[in-house]
Image (cartoon, grey):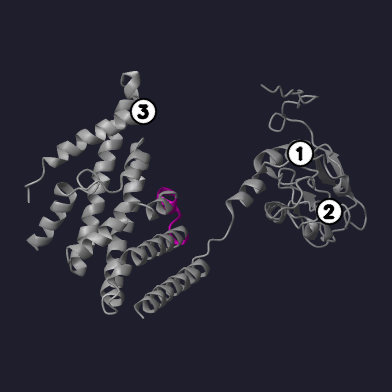
Amino acid sequence: MSIVLALFVVCIIALIFGGILGWAAIRYKVEGDPLVDKINQVLPQTQCGQCGYPGCKPYAEAIANGDEINKCPPGGDDGVRTLADLLGRDYKPLDASHGEEGPKTVAYIREDECIGCTKCIQACPVDAILGAPKLMHTVIVDECTGCDLCVEPCPVDCIDMLPLKTATDNWVWPSPQEIIPVKMISD
Amino acid sequence: MSDYIFLLVATIFVNNFVLVKFLGLCPFMGVSSKVDTALGMSAATTFVLTLASGTSFIVNEFILEPLKIEYLRTISFILVIAVVVQFTEMVIHKTSPLLYQLLGIFLPLITTNCAVLGVALLNIQEAHSFVESLLYGFGAAIGFSLALVLFAGIRERLETSDIPVAFQGSSIALITAGLMSMAFMGFSGLV
C-alpha cells in the first residue's frame, strides 16, 4: 500500500512542480533570440525586401528558423559567406531569383519633375525621403540604403538610382579578386 | 539571537561545507581558475542554497512527514532543487538581464551541486526549524563562497609560479585544497 502512496505523492509533487515551471515559462518568457540579433547585424539593413520578407529583421528570423542564407543581394557574396561562417552552414552562391548584387547606389529625385505625390515617401522603408504633399521631395543621402523601392511607385519616373560616390567615409579596401584556394591535406 | 549567530559562524568556519565536510567539490575545482567566475558562482550558489533549504524544509514538514514517507526525501529534494533553480533562472532572465549575465551559466550547474542536496538533508538530520534551515543554508553558501574565492585567488597566483612538472595543473590545485582544508580544521572548537 505504501508503495502506491509513495508513487502517488511523487507524481503529484512532480505534476505541481511541472505546472509551476510551465506557467513560469509562459509568464517569464523572454522575447528575442540572440541568434536573430547576430544574423540581423550581418544583414545590410537596406530593408529592401528583395529576399521576400518585409525587412532585414524578419529575414534574420526566417534564417534562424532554417531559411536559405543566399537571398540577400545587397549583402552580396561576402554577406552570404559571413552568414555561412556564423551559422556553420555551407556557402551557396546568391540566388539570382532575388536579384543580383550591384554596386552601392543612392536614390536621387530630379526635383524639377517631382509633382509632390508622396508615393515614394510611403514606399521608403527607412524614412530617407523628405517632403510634403504638393511640395518637392528630396532624398537624405546619408539615410538612403539604395533599395530601389521608391523607383517603382513614382508616377512621373523622376527617381534615379545613382552609384554612390566614393568618399573618404565610405571607401573600403577592394576585396581580393579570387578566394585563396585552400588544399586540405590529410595527415 | 546569539544562537543564530553561532549557527552562522559554525557553518561558515567550523563546519565549512567544502573544506571540512567535503561537499560541493566539483564546482570548487571546476570554477575556481578565475576570481571573477568564482564570485559569480558564489553569488548564484548563495541564492540557490538559501532558497532550496527553505523550500525543502517546507516540502519535508508539510508533505513528507504527515504522510510518513520520509524515505522519499532524497528524490523529492532533488526535484525541489531542480525546480527552484530552473524557476530562478527564468525569473532572473526576465527581470534582470544584468544579473542573468552574471549568474546565467552557473545556475544550471548548481542543480547538480551536491552541497545543495547536502544542506537540505543535513537540515532534516539536525532537526532545524524553518529560520534555522534558512540560516544554515545561507551560512553554508557563505562558507562555500569564502572557500571558493580564496581558492580561486590562490590558483590565479599559482598560474604564474614555477611549479615542478609533476605537480602542474590539478595536482597542485588538489594539494592546495588539502592545505586549505587543514587550515580550516583549525577553526574546530571555535563554537
Task: Determine the CA span between mark 1 and mark 3.
Answer: 41 Å
Residue in the image at 76% along x and 26% along y: A174
Chain letter for the residue marked with disc 2 in the picture: A
A35 displayed left or right of B140: right
Q: Is the magenta stretch mostly helix, strand or loop?
A: helix
Task: Determine the CA span between mark 2 and mark 1.
Answer: 32 Å
The N terminus of chain B: image quadrant: bottom left
> How many numbered callouts?
3
Where does the magenta region start and end? B94-104
Query: The residue tagged with tag 1: helix, strand or loop?
Result: loop
Which numbered mark, 2 or 1, is in the foreground of this view? 1
Pick whichever of labels 2 and 1 is earlier in the sequence.
1
Q: Do the residues labelled 2 and 1 touch (CB within 8 Å)?
A: no
A168 falls in the magenta region: no
Q: Do the residues labelled 3 and 2 touch (CB within 8 Å)?
A: no
Q: Is residue B55 visible to us here?
A: no
Q: Is residue A3 above or below residue A55?
A: below
Residue type at mark 3 is: Gly
Q: For the residue carrying disc 1, how many other residues have a C-alpha within 10 Å: few (<14), some (14-19), or many (20+)?
A: some
Residue type at mark 1 is: Tyr
Reading the image, the residue beneath label 1 is A91
Instruction: Say which quarter of the image contains residue A85.
Output: top right
B106 displayed left or right of A140: left
Query: The residue tagged with tag 2: helix, strand or loop?
Result: loop
Indicate which disc residue A150 carries: 2
Q: For the residue carrying disc 3, how many other residues have a C-alpha within 10 Å: few (<14), some (14-19), or many (20+)?
A: few
Residues behind callouts 1 and 3 on a single chain: no
Q: Where is residue A43 in the image (x, y as percent from the top left)?
A: 70, 45
Q: Is residue B37 visible to us here?
A: yes
Reading the image, the residue beneath label 3 is B169
Which numbered mark, 3 or 2, is in the foreground of this view? 3
Query: Which residue occupies the extreme front position in the image?
Result: A1
